[in-house]
Image (spheres, rainbow, N blue to C red):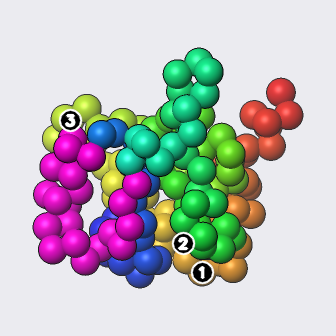
Amino acid sequence: SLKAAERLGAYCVYCERPEYANKILNAIDPKEELFSFRLYRENCYLTDKGIYIKDLRILERPMERTVLVDNAAYSYGFQPFNGIPIIPFTGYKHDAELLFLSDYLDYLKNFPDFRKINRETFKYQFYLNS
């Protein structure tokens, strides 16, 4: 999925504190070549219920070409069609979730509006209308 992210132009929006997030991001991208921008918990919107929601508009990028991969669907609540759900990593050595993500990102890059494909693939209308 790192190669797919490179081809798409990756930003990293992360909902943890910088000291924790940077350990992970530095392991993935030690030369800071892959992720061109890092956002942290303080860059998120905090609801009155204590939930952090990421707002992709602060990236000032075209929303039709922007995605947010997260294991918590509420985190992309402001832009639900930009969201790509992913199962959390639990340490299972045969976890293939990032491989699935890589394939999906490779597929997605062929379309002018990622949101349309996400909406169809993940059936978001079903959830938003219920």
Residue topped by disc 2: 107
Q: Earlier in the sequence, mark 2 or mark 3?
A: 3
2 and 3 marks in contact (CB < 8 Å): no
Residue topped by disc 1: 110
What type is the residue that disc 1 sits on?
Asn
Q: CA distance from mark 1 to mark 2?
A: 6 Å
Q: Earlier in the sequence, mark 1 or mark 3?
A: 3
What type is the residue that disc 2 sits on?
Tyr
What type is the residue that disc 3 sits on?
Tyr
The picture places residue 43, in percent across and down from the top left corner, at 47, 48
Determine the residue positioned at 33% across, 69% down.
35
- Residue 126 on the magenta span: no
- Residue 33 on the magenta span: yes
Q: Which mark is residue 66?
A: none
Residues drawn in magenta: 18-39
Determine the residue positioned at 74% across, 63% down.
116
The picture places residue 122, in percent across and down from the top left corner, at 65, 47
Q: Residue furthest right?
A: 129
